[in-house]
Image (cartoon, rainbow, N blue to C red):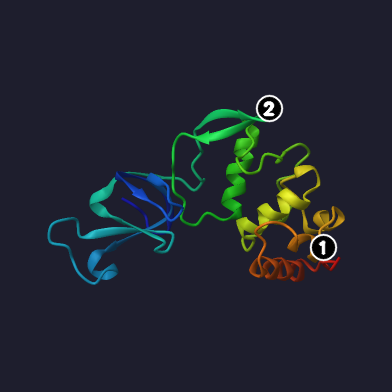
Amino acid sequence: MIQNGKNYLLTLDNWFVAPDGKEYMAVWGKCTVRQCSEALGFNPTRSSNWIVEVDDGKMIVAGCQLHFAVQTDEPPKIQLGTYTSDETKLLRPVNRIYIPSMNINTFMSLTWDLLDRGFAPKNNQNLSKQGADTDRGIWRRSDVSMKLYRQLLNGFSPNGRPDFTLQDCIDNGLTVQAFINRRNVGKHLLFELEDLCKKENVKLPNE
């Protein structure tokens, strides 16, 4: 029996396409079982009359598509194949597991595991765990978007440390102007950075 409010790894009978455009056959997140009449307003006549909501409705799985359910509070590990780019060993996921509420906490939990196994996550080739302290850094905040984290990591983290703080970034050249000058930085990301600085009580230099 699936217990509402707990995290499950669900294996489905068919592939599905997620918003990232990739195909998956498994999903992990907080699950809630509901009757179709409650969630959809009607009961199907030719299939199961219940569904599973994942992460507060970010994904809905029809009961007839559910094949396996494994209760686990830890994000699922990624099985990897490897390839080499510029003498750096990079990952290529073999299994695809969709995580609807992927945030920086979940992302970094997976990243620690990859770094422990000697991989550099794709698009973060400079990431290093050397000397890292998993109990510090802005990645521990649930209100930091992955996009902001990656911009700071790739542009201002000292020596690619994943456990960087805002002060680390400022000491390494982070200013309003330097941040704006990076590729793919819009006003919404600058607003997020400025808001984060206020929450952390850190002054962000203009230049």
Depicted 80 relative to depicted 205: above or below: above
Q: Name the residue under label 1.
A: 175
Locate residue 188, reporting x and y percent.
64, 69
x then y, percent, for residue 144: 64, 61
Q: In this view, does 177 lie to the left or right of 125?
A: right
Task: Pinpoint residue 182: horizontal percent, then vertical percent.
Answer: 72, 57
- Secondary structure type for disc 2: loop
Q: Position of residue 123 (x, y in %)?
A: 62, 44
Residue, x 17% and y 62% (percent of image)? 44
Look at 75% across and 42% down and name the residue there.
132
**SS at badge 1:** loop
Identity, as a three-letter code, of the amino acid under mark 2: Glu
Decide which of tag 2 and tag 1 comes sooner along the chain.
2
Q: Which amino acid does label 1 sit on?
A: Thr
Q: Which mark is residue 60?
A: none
State the image quarter where residue 34 is shown: bottom left
Q: Quadrant of the C terminus?
A: bottom right
10 Å crowding of disc 2: few (<14), some (14-19), many (20+): few
Relative to residue 178, is residue 83 depicted above or below?
above
